[in-house]
Image (spheres, rainbow, N blue to C red):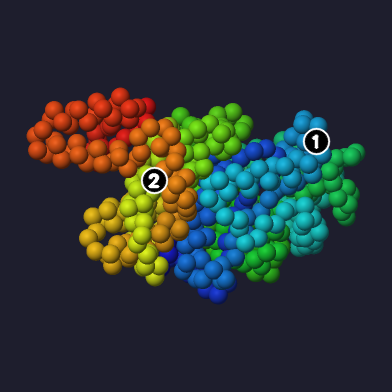
Amino acid sequence: MTLQLYNTAKRRKEVFVPRDPQNVGMYVCGPTVYDTAHIGNARPAVVFDVLANLLRLMYGEEHVTYVRNITDVEDKIIEAAEQNGETIEELTTRTTQAYHEDMGALGVGLPNREPRATQHIGGMIEMITTLINKGHAYEAEGHVLFDVQSMPDYGKLSGRNREELIEGARVEVAPFKKDPADFVLWKPSPGDMMGWDSPWGKGRPGWHIECSVMSKAELGEAFDIHGGGRDLVFPHHENEVAQSCCANEDKTYARYWVHNGFLTVEGKKMSKSLGNFFTVRDLLDKASKLEKCAGEIYRFVLLNTDYRQPLNWTEEGVQNAENSLNTLYTALQKLEGIDAELSANPDTVIAHLQNDIDTPFALKELIAIAKKANTAENDDEKAVLKGQLVNGAALLGVLQQPLDDWFKGAVEDGLQAENIEALIQERIDAKNNKNYARADEIRDSLKEQGVILEDGPGGTSWKRA
Ligand code: AMP
Ligand code: ZN
């Protein structure tokens, strides 16, 4: 069983070999807590939750440390607190709690460690001092800047040339910079702005130094996997590499860089700045049906597209996810009374996850197991298939709701999913027997009860009107 991961640093898929299988470390950039999370922000949380589950399965729960930080000092936070008339602490406490609730609704577990930037200011001052002492950073007008010219490999992670680096840095004109691509490690906090005493006066850290310091504090100078959304490759991760490799004794830093693609709306990245976003909370609130299970439906949508590809958020995608989950829950319901063989290995699901976290195919395999269970004849076979279903679903973080919660929503809304599936099967049988009148009758009767059938190449799917 080997795991393959697409490594952004190498621009290819590689076999994952941990530095020490007894001590596997993964660091993922977490939220900047100034506002509630949108569903795009949830994509990395869900994807890396699945990767953490897989690593725990492969190396043992106690041998994996998954770290996801909270960025609780950043200019957007200072601005938002001012606008809302809240203290920074009130804002970051409130939004961190909302983040945990929203991710929890999507079935995302807490990481093993969740460092907050404000707890690591001392470490940041220390690393910045080391960078200055080693000739990689300089002080100018209360700022400390990283000197990109001092690092020949700068730009290697993102594969940018010098022009692109300058263009991408999108920095405000700052006459005190030696090079336009130099970036801020420390900046002054005038007046009563949030800040800490430092050798360079009262100030606050730049965003990039926060992750270099928190990852080192939790995982050491070198660790296995560093993850985040694709937008973080440059400048955030490029700058983390620069800081850590120049300050640390060990020049490795992260060995595998894993980045998820964007969640998009009409082809554009969902983002706060474009205003084309909906928050996880909004989505949960508007889901009247299957209320308690809505988060799992959204999780399924997020996992139903390859993590590196763009994911366009549509109503149709949500409906497909609900239908697929319904197939899974219906199979599980049919297996009630069967004791799952919990040592059963969902090897087809695992194989896809080990192929660069191929969650869409892993979900398809889970559905294949469910369908096999539907037609299984003896209890031993059913017990094994139930074990595979339960174990495979746990890895993906789906099928985690009580059966009653899943089916209750459907009953309140009319026909139970189970009856609908049975009628669809009856319609297929009728068509096969050329009894088209009966087939049409079933379609029409379902329609009257608010269920629309759609025939497609993959069979018949249904949705509620
Ligand atoms: P932020 O709170 O903006 O720092 O973002 C938190 C995480 O969400 C980062 O890993 C981002 O890369 C990721 N992210 C932000 N927008 C999107 C999006 N539209 N699709 C996927 N990931 C995103
Ligand atoms: Zn980060």
Q: Secondary structure at mark 2?
A: helix
Q: Determine the residue positioned at 55% across, 51% down.
A: 108
* Residue 325 numbered tag: 2
Q: Determine the residue positioned at 22% across, 41% down.
A: 425
Q: Secondary structure at mark 1?
A: loop
**Kind of residue at disc 1:** Glu
**Kind of residue at disc 2:** Leu
Q: Which residue is mark 1?
A: 86
Q: Determine the residue positioned at 54% across, 68% down.
A: 61
Q: Quadrant of residue 282?
A: top right
| Picture layout, residue 125 above or below residue 1 | above
The answer to whether one can see residue 19 in this image is no
Image x and y of residue 192, in percent:
89, 40
Judge by depth and name the residue closer to the eye, 330 or 140: 330
Image x and y of residue 418, in percent:
32, 43
Q: Badge 1 local density, few (<14 within 10 Å), some, or many (20+)?
A: few
Disc 2 residue lies near ligand 1 with CB under 8 A: no
